[in-house]
Image: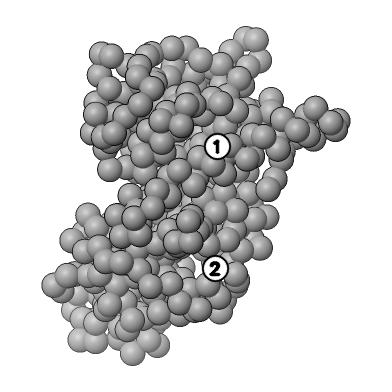
Amino acid sequence: MRFGFMVNNVETEEAGYTTVRLGMEATNMGHEAWFIGAGGFTYDVDEKIHAQARAVSKTNYKSNEVYVKDLQGPKARIEYITVDDLDVLMLRSDPSTETGARSWAQTAGINFGRVAMRHGVIVLNDPNGLSKAMNKMYFQLFPEEVRPRTLISHNRDEIKNFVKEQGGQAVLKPLQGSGGSGVFLVRPGDAANLNQMIESLTRDGYVIAQEYLPAAHEGDTRLFLMNGRPFRYRGKYAAFRRVRTGDDMRSNIHAGGKLREAEITDQHLKIAEIVRPKLVQDGMFLVGLDIVGDKLMEINVFSPGGLGSAQKFEKVKFTKGVIHALERKVDYMRYYRRNFDNVEMATL
């Protein structure tokens, strides 16, 4: 089978990234795995989508480091491929990192992915669903019972009133962004600094003001969902915990958080079941839920990472489970094309 992985920039992919792990797994399982950067697509005069793409030259790898080195180095296969001939195109770019001169790249995968879908390619996550999730407002479309109390505003007085209503303690963060960038914890007694925090955030757009969850002190749990259900492979949940260190309220790994093994509870599974209908409706194949206590803090739909961390603790190859699921989707698609008319998408 022929798989395509669309990323922000092939040259900046790293060995630990989930997309690299998926590409290596696909290669080791006998498939073609092509990597396409956000600027690599072309809608050509033949009305097909083409792309400048890279693939490794060998068929088996034991090391992520060697795989990504071959992918980015002179030994890589570099071809002008026809995206419409791919079996699967996975959109794995993060639009929140594409700012300034590269703002054009935010919707590249969505726009070209939509056309590829019309030509019969299985595109995941669904570009029409991803277009709804271009900022954190998407999170507010899920049931209220799984979300912290939230205000989204550009009005400084409204933000300050919300913080006051929360007893002087709240979390402030930008509507656009990811990875814990620009996140502030307001504590009682921070009135002198609150204006500066709000001014810093409103300079770049709307602000999310959110109730502070005391359970956040112990970090959060990343739980992967596949096709709307908790992702299990060989009896293990694809999940891990991130715990904060020192006084930094963020548990993101690049913000200093530490990894721990996750224990998936009935509460985690209940949250997953509550959000499942909308995720399925929006065509979200692989998603990462960030859960604190009994609340959902974030839904990662663009390029949820951390499968390698889950594999480290659970000792199973979740990447293999993802590729098996893609194989089943392709097999179903081929079956329906042979036996039925006007079927555009196969589902499991």
Per the image, the residue denoted by label 2 is 272
Q: Is residue 178 above or below residue 144?
A: above
Residue at 26% in and 66% down = 260
Quarter holding residue 198: bottom left
The answer to whether the residue labelled 1 contacts the one labelled 2, judged by CB atoms less than 8 Å apart, is no
Depth check: give the residue in front, 59 or 115: 59
Depth check: give the residue in front, 311 or 70: 311
State the separation of the CA atoms marked 1 and 2: 25 Å
Query: How crowded is the residue under tag 1: few (<14 C-alpha within 10 Å), some, or many (20+)?
Result: many
Mark 1 element type: helix
Per the image, the residue denoted by label 1 is 110
Which quarter of the rendering shows the N terminus? top right
Q: Which mark is residue 316?
A: none
Give the amino acid at mark 2.
Ala
Which of the two labelled residues, at mark 1 and mark 2, occupies the earlier sequence position? 1
- Is residue 208 among the parts visible in the rendering? no
Query: How crowded is the residue under tag 2: few (<14 C-alpha within 10 Å), some, or many (20+)?
Result: many
Residue at 64% in and 39% down = 329
Residue at 19% in and 74% down = 193
Question: Going by the image, does 83 lie left or right of 104?
Answer: right
Give the amino acid at mark 1.
Ile
- Place of residue 8 in the rendered image (x, y in percent of width and height, measured from the top left): 38, 34
**Closer mark to the observer between disc 1 and disc 2:** 2
Question: Going by the image, does 329 lie left or right of 286?
Answer: right
Quarter holding residue 277: bottom right
